[in-house]
């Protein structure tokens, strides 16, 4: 491998746009010319295509992944005095929506290998107040949904899949977002399927839930100016829908490129001392929104600085688990209570990962990491 001095970003969305610029420009101009900027046939068409892609009957788009989670909780009437179990090792959107509907987040520690919910600890956290579970398919790696659904069905709990980082991932050949009662997606620009702004979607096979979601996201109105309940304004712009329609056609190819990069990282990093590369569960096929290693012996920050000096930019997801965030002091979680999440937050380092990452750039990442750990 030949070391290059070119700086490598942790992610690069400009190259992807350049590859489809002509298609995007045409589609956006068609929307602008149509005068249908909110709703309309482009939005409806994308909903149908995204539902078909994920193997579900219904898709309801909204303006962010956060709103998708919020609306999902609202659709199942989860609120005051209810508890919702989720992971502390994720972006705060997953838990803040639980608070937003008046419910209480209950955090369960993660598995050290996958960074996803530790399902052995999940059952012990269920109480008579538990109404739902929000598993997060973190970094694009699916949770063991067979085991999770078994637990949920035993206790009659709603499962809301957080698929923000995992569009296209599968568990036993079934798309995430189609296994639980409802799936929530983000189209933030850095996601595997990312727009040119915020956006989100909700998938389900329940037509009644889909109908309720459509009312909730439109100010609680089924018929114009007749408001049946308190809703919100959460719509996906037609321009974003037009862009996402184009990108959806390329998503599987882009995900395959991510998988190839992850495989190559694994080949060269699997036996490197001082780090633990990520692992996939049998039955799961991830889409590698992030390729996140663990750096041992309290060297994560030092390694990150060394990589940056060598032109390799990295990210830390996440430097502090949710149960120890200041906003959750009232829940009285103590340091050491969820030790795997706490240790992970001190060790995780996400290497450059995007479909256009060249082999030369991959070599620079691998060479630089081996060099600074030597």
Image (tube, grey):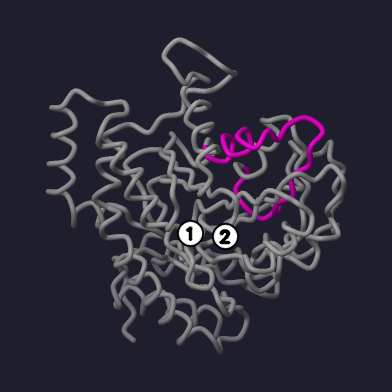
Residue visible at 63% across and 70% down? 114
**Residue extending furthest toward the front:** 207
Q: Is residue 275 above or below residue 146?
A: below
Q: Are marks 2 and 1 in contact (CB under 8 Å)?
A: yes
Q: Which mark is residue 276?
A: none
Depth check: give the residue in front, 109 or 212.
Answer: 212
Residue on which disc 2 sits: 138
Depth check: give the residue in front, 103 or 346.
Answer: 103
The reply to whether the magenta stretch includes residue 311 is: no
Q: CA distance from mark 2 to mark 1?
A: 7 Å
Location of the N terminus by quadrant is bottom left
Query: Where does the image place residue 274, in percent across and percent down from the top left?
Result: 63, 81
Residue visible at 42% across and 58% down? 55
Q: Residues within 10 Å of mark 1 (few under 14, many from 20)?
A: many
Q: Is residue 159 left or right of residue 207?
A: right
Depth check: give the residue in front, 214 or 348.
Answer: 214
**Residue extending furthest toward the bottom:** 271
Helix, strand or loop status at disc 2: helix
Mark 2 vs 1, N-terminal side? 2
Helix, strand or loop status at disc 1: loop
Query: Where does the image place residue 292, in percent across and percent down from the top left?
Result: 54, 68
Residue visible at 31% across and 26% down? 38
Residue on which disc 1 sits: 166
Q: Is residue 310 above or below residue 338?
A: below
Query: Where does the image place residue 268, in percent across and percent down from the top left?
Result: 46, 86
Magenta segment: 68-92
Residue visible at 68% across and 48% down? 158
Depth check: give the residue in front, 282 or 164.
Answer: 282
């Amino acid at each position: 491998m030949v070391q290059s001095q070119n700086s490598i970003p942790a992610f690069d969305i400009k190259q992807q746009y350049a590859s489809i610029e002509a298609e995007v420009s045409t589609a956006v101009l068609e929307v602008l010319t149509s005068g249908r900027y909110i709703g309309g046939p482009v939005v409806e068409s994308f909903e149908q295509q995204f539902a078909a892609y994920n193997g579900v009957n219904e898709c309801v788009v909204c303006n962010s992944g956060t709103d998708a989670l919020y609306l999902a909780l609202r659709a199942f009437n989860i609120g005051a005095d209810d508890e919702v179990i989720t992971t502390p090792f994720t972006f705060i959107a997953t838990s803040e929506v639980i608070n937003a509907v008046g419910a209480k987040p209950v955090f369960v520690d993660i598995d050290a290998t996958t960074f996803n919910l530790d399902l052995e600890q999940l059952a012990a956290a269920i109480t008579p107040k538990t109404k739902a579970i929000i598993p997060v398919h973190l970094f694009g790696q699916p949770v063991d949904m067979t085991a999770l659904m078994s637990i949920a069905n035993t206790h009659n709990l709603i499962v809301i899949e957080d698929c923000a980082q995992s569009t296209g991932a599968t568990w036993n050949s079934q798309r995430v977002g189609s296994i639980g009662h409802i799936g929530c997606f983000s189209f933030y620009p850095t996601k595997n399927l990312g727009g040119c702004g915020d956006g989100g979607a909700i998938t389900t096979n329940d037509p009644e839930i889909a109908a309720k979601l459509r009312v909730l996201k439109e100010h609680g109105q089924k018929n114009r100016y007749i408001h049946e309940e308190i809703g919100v304004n959460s719509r996906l712009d037609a321009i974003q829908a037009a862009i996402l329609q184009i990108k959806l056609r390329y998503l599987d190819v882009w995900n395959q490129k991510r998988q190839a990069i992850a495989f190559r990282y694994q080949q060269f990093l699997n036996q490197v001392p001082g780090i633990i590369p990520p692992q996939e569960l049998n039955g799961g096929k991830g889409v590698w929104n992030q390729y996140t290693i663990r750096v041992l012996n309290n060297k994560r920050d030092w390694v990150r600085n060394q990589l940056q000096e060598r032109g390799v930019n990295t990210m830390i997801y996440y430097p502090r688990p949710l149960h120890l965030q200041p906003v959750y002091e009232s829940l009285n979680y103590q340091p050491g209570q969820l030790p795997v999440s706490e240790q992970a937050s001190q060790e995780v380092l996400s290497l450059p990962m995007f479909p256009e990452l060249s082999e030369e750039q991959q070599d620079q990442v691998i060479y630089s990491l081996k060099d600074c750990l030597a």
